[in-house]
Image: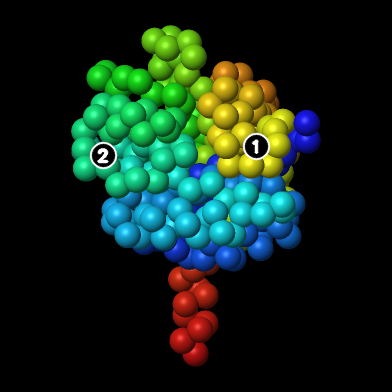
Amino acid sequence: MPVLNGLFHVHSDYSYDGKLSLEKIKSACKHYGFDFVILAEHSQSLDDKKAEEFRKKCRELSDGDVVLIPSVEYSCEGGMHIVGLGVSEIISETKVDAVIKKIRDLGGFPIMAHPTKYENFNTEGVEGLGGVELWNFSYDGLWPRKRGIEIFSEMKKKDENLLSFFGLDLHYFYRFFLAEKLLMSMKIESEKTEKTVIAALRNGEFYFENLFFCSDSKGNVIMPKMFSEVSAKVYDFSKSSFKFFLKVKKKLRRR
Ligand SMILES: [Zn+2]
Ligand SMILES: [Zn+2]
């Protein structure tokens, strides 16, 4: 079976903060050599009609080059986000446990997004997850943070089948460039269809890698130890310098 190269956790302009159309995402994937892309649109930005249109468009655009897989990132009470892999229906429940259960009932696979974002996070009462983002590019930076690894291993103690995911949380075009340059993608062995890709992910038959680290689906991360310790600092620094860059750009544009 062929080895596919894909992206996990991507937002299109179906999300309020996504800047890329599905067409643009597809052509960027094709250009950079990604075979599939798991979209995770914000639930707040969708209603039944829009969700249906989103699903339809993903399937229309999917072809032998790139498969677009429609999924939704559900906002829950308390601010937690749960990605329903393979599910894009509107869910009226808002409690974390109820959302997780509903995703399962709809035949999807619930994955907790960016656990390092949540302050005073504790795993109490979170039942039935299929996976957790041990690393999220938007919140953790170029490589996993110690805290993400700790949260994942703590949760895995309660459920040994829990899978570790690496979410790009990609909203802008420049991230495609980074994803390609840093080889920040997931690899699976599968036929190139929505069904077989989702099945491989649910079964944990994947791994992630970039220039700095790699990780299997069981949360075994291989990277230089110092990275996890300096990661948070590097991330804060890069975030503030990026903000500074945007400010300068804005000023120059006004001239
Ligand atoms: Zn989120
Ligand atoms: Zn997201």
Q: Indicate the quadrant containing the N terminus: top left, top right, bottom left or bottom right.
A: top right
Kindly state the secondary structure of the residue where label 1 is placed.
strand
Kindly state the secondary structure of the residue where label 2 is placed.
loop
Lateral position of residue 29 relative to residue 21, left or right: right
Question: Circle 1 sits on which residue?
Answer: 186
Image point (26%, 39%), residue name? 76
Q: Residue furthest right?
A: 2
Name the N-terminal-most of marks 2 and 1.
2
In the rendered view, would you say 246 is above or below 153? below
Coloured how?
Answer: rainbow
Residue 118 image offset from top left, x and y in percent: 32, 35
Residue 113 image offset from top left, x and y in percent: 42, 37
Residue 69 image offset from top left, x and y in percent: 54, 46
Q: Nearer the viewer, residue 80 or 98?
A: 98
Find the distance from the CA under tag 2 to the CA under tag 1.
27 Å
Lateral position of residue 243 relative to residue 104, left or right: right
Question: Circle 2 sits on which residue?
Answer: 76
Which amino acid is tagged 2? Cys
Image point (61%, 54%), residue name? 62
Residue 125 image offset from top left, x and y in percent: 25, 19
